[in-house]
């Protein structure tokens, strides 16, 4: 998410028992990280595209500040698909 420019707050679940309990409650009893919450929707180890989609749905004013095309992740995908120009 850092490389995509998505603003977030990182919480260490091994230092915050309440956060650990929340993660277990949405991850089938597991302490799976990252667990991301956007607008009340919890997502366990989601792809960045899902986080961006949820952010655009619930907070379009925040999503509008994200890089067009998804930032570095989209550039990497374009590069891997061969449509990203120079592969140096």
Image (cartoon, grey):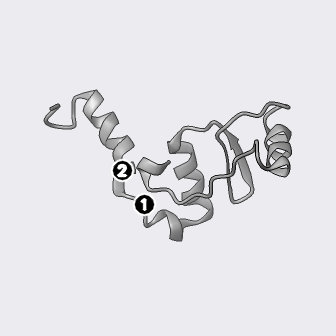
Residue 35, given in percent of the width and then of the height, sits at 68, 42
In this figure, which residue is indicated by the disc labeled 1? 66
In this figure, which residue is indicated by the disc labeled 2? 71
Which sits in the foreground, 45 or 78? 45
Residue 81, given in percent of the width and then of the height, sits at 28, 28
Residue at position x 73%, y 47% in the image: 42
Q: Which mark is residue 3?
A: none
Q: Residues within 10 Å of mark 1 (few under 14, many from 20)?
A: some
Residue at position x 42%, y 60% in the image: 66
Q: Quadrant of residue 55?
A: bottom right
Q: Are marks 2 and 1 in contact (CB under 8 Å)?
A: yes
Q: Residue furthest front?
A: 15
Left or right of 49? Residue 72 is left
Check disc 2 and report its element: helix, strand or loop.
Answer: loop
Q: Residues within 10 Å of mark 2 (few under 14, many from 20)?
A: some
Q: In which quadrant of the rendered image does the C terminus lie?
A: top left
Among the two numbered marks 2 and 1 on one chain, the one whose residue lies closer to the N terminus = 1
Q: Residue furthest bottom?
A: 61
Residue at position x 80%, y 30% in the image: 30
Check disc 1 and report its element: helix, strand or loop.
Answer: loop
Label 2 – label 1 distance at C-alpha? 8 Å
């Amino acid at each position: 998410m850092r490389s995509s420019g998505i603003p977030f707050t990182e919480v260490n679940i091994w230092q915050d028992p309440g956060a650990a309990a929340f993660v277990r409650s949405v991850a089938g009893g597991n302490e799976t990280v990252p667990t991301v919450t956007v607008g009340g929707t919890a997502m366990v180890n989601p792809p960045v595209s899902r986080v961006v989609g949820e952010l655009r749905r619930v907070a379009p004013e925040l999503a509008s500040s994200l890089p067009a095309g998804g930032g570095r992740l989209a550039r990497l995908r374009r590069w891997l698909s061969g449509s990203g120009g120079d592969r140096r």
